[in-house]
Every structure is written in structure tokens, then in C-alpha cells.
Image: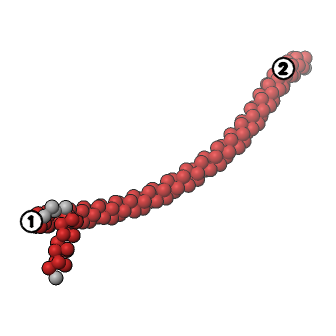
Amino acid sequence: EKEALTSTLNAACAKLGATNHLNLLDSIDDIKVEKSQSDSQIATLTVDLTTVQSDLAASQHAREELSQHLNELSMEIEKGRSVVSCLEQTIAASQEEWATDRKTLNDEIETLREKARSCDTEIQGLKCNAEKSRQDYDELASQLNETRREL
């Protein structure tokens, strides 16, 4: 049994790099210190991992909120485009209507101008007739006066 323990002790020394059995205790203490440091690093990394997971969850939540806000803005933009399109159609229809109204009014103005020219021509004709009638009246009046004097 002593030989088995000696063999185990020699194997442990070989694994730990200890040159003799006394250095074996120092090597075991070194391994305990390294294990303690590793445990501390594991605890730190666990906290860091929890922080990263929390940050990731917060980022995911922020991303979802931004995505929802982007969708809302996209819908507002689409509504705006729809309103603009409707306004463009209304403006186009109004412009067509105004063009038709302008042509109709221009035609009516031209008709009234023609009537005015016709009326001017008729007035000139009536003035001429009135002047001729006055001359005829003056001539008849003159003949009447002459006839009265002869009688």
C-alpha cells in the first residue's frame, strides 16, 4: 500500500511539475490560488454576461420600438402621399374646369363684342335715318310754309 501511495505521489509530482514531495504542497497551494482566481474570473464573466444579455434585451426592445415608430411614420407618409395625390387630382380637375370656363367666357365676350359692333352699326344707321328724316321734315315744313303763303 505504501508503494501505491508512493506511486500516486510520484505521479502527482510529475503532473504538477514538483521536483520532490515537499514542493508538491507548494504546487497544490498554487493550484488552489489559480482555482480561486479562475472562480473569481468566472464570477466576473458571469456578471459581464448578465450585463451583456440585459443590454441585448434593452437593445432588442429599443429596436422593436424604433421599428414600430418607423412603421407608424411609413403609414403617415403613405397617408400624406394619398392626400397629395388627391390634391393633385383636384387641382388638375379645377384647372381643366377653369380652362373650360375661360374658353366659355372668352366666347361670350366675343359674342358680346360682335353684338356691340352690330349695335354700333345699327345706331349709325338710325342716326343716318334720323338725319334724313330731319332733312325730310325740314323740307316738308318748308313746303308747308310755302304752301300756306301761297294760299
Helix, strand or loop for disc 1: helix
Q: From the viewer's perspective, is 151 left or right of 35?
A: right
Which dot marks residue 22? Answer: 1
- Name the residue that disc number 2 marks: 135
Query: Farthest residue in the bottom direction?
Result: 1
Please provide percent x and percent y for residue 104: 72, 42
Report whether 137 appears left or right of 52.
Answer: right
Residue 123 visible to an observer of this rendering:
no
Query: Looking at the picture, does residue 73 appear above or below residue 113?
Result: below
Amino acid type of the residue tagged 2 in the rendering: Gln
Estimate how packed mark 1 is, as few (under 14), some (14 to 19) or many (20 or more) residues with alpha carbons within 10 Å.
few
| Above or below 49: residue 5 | below
Q: Earlier in the sequence, mark 1 or mark 2?
A: 1
61 relative position to 133: left or right: left
43 or 86, nearer to the observer: 43
Res 131 seen here: yes
Q: Which quadrant: the C terminus?
A: top right
- The quadrant holding residue 117 is top right
- Image position, residue 94 (x, y; %): 63, 47
Q: Position of residue 2 (x, y in %)?
A: 14, 79
Residue at (18% x, 69% y) in the render: 10
- The chosen color scheme is secondary structure
**Can you tell which of label 1 and label 2 is closer to the viewer?**
1
| Labels in figure, total | 2
Quarter of the rendering occupied by the N terminus: bottom left
- Residue closest to the eye, 86 or 28: 28
Q: CA distance from mark 1 to mark 2?
A: 163 Å
Farthest residue to the front: give it: 3
Q: Which mark is residue 46?
A: none
User: In what element is the residue under mark 2?
Assistant: helix
Query: Residue at the spot x=79%, y=25% of the render?
Result: 124
